[in-house]
Image (spheres, rainbow, N blue to C red):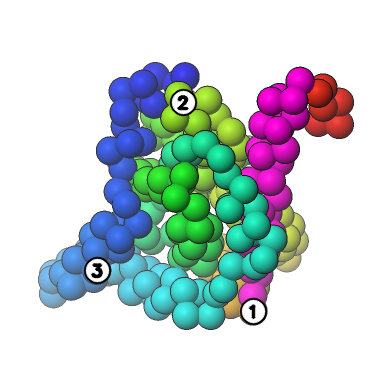
Amino acid sequence: MPDFFDEGRPHDGLRYDAYQEAWTRRLDEPPSDDADPDARRLHHYLKYNWERQARVHDSYSPSEALRSAAEAIQDAQLWMVLTEPWCGDSAFVLPVIAEAASLSDQVALRILPRDDNLDIMDQYLTDGSRSIPKLVAFTKDGEELFTWGPRPDGAARRFSELQAKHDEKMDLIEEFLEYYEEGGWTETDRELAERIQAVTERSVSGATGEADLTR
């Protein structure tokens, strides 16, 4: 069990509705006239990411594969997500994670602000980077079941392609967000279903005493 889990820090994370409420409070406090450029830029990201996540919620319906995988969860799980509302990836994929978690009474979703929990984040780096969102699923006893993030595999490949194409970071980000806008975020559904199903299959295999030599 990780020390941070034993300390109860994931358990004290924000529920999804509380995370959204905190986000709207920040939106309701626009930067002052004398605010520095970074503060103005942050508020810009918060605003547009709020609109993006709202569009995902409006258009998304969990697949049958994800519903079936979630319904098969037998034991309590805690899903910890490290993220921040200014993150473009998170605006598109966190709504899918939240919808997936809501499909099972066995799943408790808790969100930890990355920048307030860097010691935890540093245990789940992606190629040495503090990339978000990062989902880590635990049993009630703190055993790690699976991780996911910071973006679907297809989105990760697209990002790498654009890194080779663009010298300017903002040009890269603008085109990458277009990939999400065109539906790239929907891959999250399939990948979560696969992760959840793999955990269920391991659990069944262990319960029956059958060795699983394929993983």
Question: Is residue 205 positioned above or below 99 on the image?
Answer: above
Amino acid type of the residue tagged 3 in the rendering = Thr
Q: Which residue is mark 1?
A: 182
Q: Which residues are magenta?
A: 183-209
Residue 191 magenta-highlighted: yes
Q: Nearer the viewer, residue 69 or 165?
A: 69
Q: Which residue is mark 2?
A: 142
Residue 203 locus on image (x, y percent): 67, 31
Q: Secondary structure at mark 2?
A: loop
Residue 58 shows in this picture: yes
Secondary structure mostly seen in the magenta stretch: helix
Q: Secondary structure at mark 1?
A: loop
Amino acid type of the residue tagged 1 in the rendering = Glu
Residue 203 magenta-highlighted: yes
Residue 164 locus on image (x, y percent): 73, 59
**In the image, 62: left or right of 54?**
right
Residue 52 shows in this picture: no
